Amino acid sequence: MTEPDIPREELEAMFEAIRENTEWDLDGDLLWGYFFTHSDRETLEKAAEALEADGYELVQIFEAEEDGKGLGEFFLHVERVETHSVDSLHKRNVALTEFADQLGLESYDGMDVGPVEYEEDED
């Protein structure tokens, strides 16, 4: 099993900080974003297709820039509404690290989380 770059202890600290500093329901659905890096945009586009087939939604693929110039490093951002515990998120990070390794991506670059913002129906 591939170990992710994000140790389980960091996930525990993240969950604790969210519980202390937000009103989010960590025992319910949240919007989880996942990030990957690679020097070739087309490779990330293929990764995005595979992730979309697995239920992730593509947010964007973008090139890192400095002073308005591309740096040749691309980021893939996907997201999915899900409920995680420290253990399930650790398993997800392991799986996404293995996915990145299998596709030859430079990295699985971690995740972020936020509340799910549902659009209100307009009547």
Image (cartoon, rainbow, N blue to C red):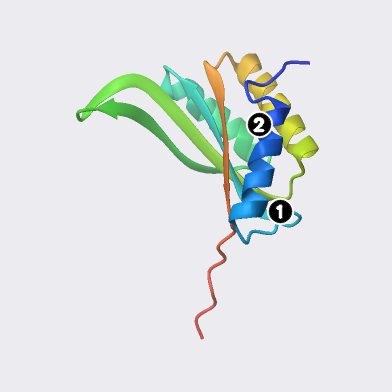
Q: Residue 26's mark?
A: 1
Q: Which image quadrant for residue 79?
A: top right
* In front of the other: 9 or 107: 9
Q: Residue 10's mark?
A: 2
| Place of residue 121 in the rendered image (x, y in percent of width and height, measured from the top left) | 54, 77
* In front of the other: 110 or 70: 110
Question: 10 Å neighbourhood of mark 2: few (<14), some, or many (≥20)?
Answer: few
Classify mark 2: helix, strand or loop: helix
| Place of residue 32 in the rendered image (x, y in percent of width and height, measured from the top left) | 61, 45
What is the total number of numbered labels drawn onto the structure image?
A: 2
Q: Residue furthest left?
A: 67
- Amino acid bearing label 2: Glu
- Amino acid bearing label 1: Leu
Q: Residue furthest bottom?
A: 123
Please indicate whether residue 87 sits to the left or right of residue 93 in the image: right
61 above or below 32? above
* Residue at 61% from the left image edge and 39% from the top image edge: 52
Q: CA distance from mark 2 to mark 1?
A: 16 Å
* Residue at 52% from the left image edge and 15% from the top image edge: 106
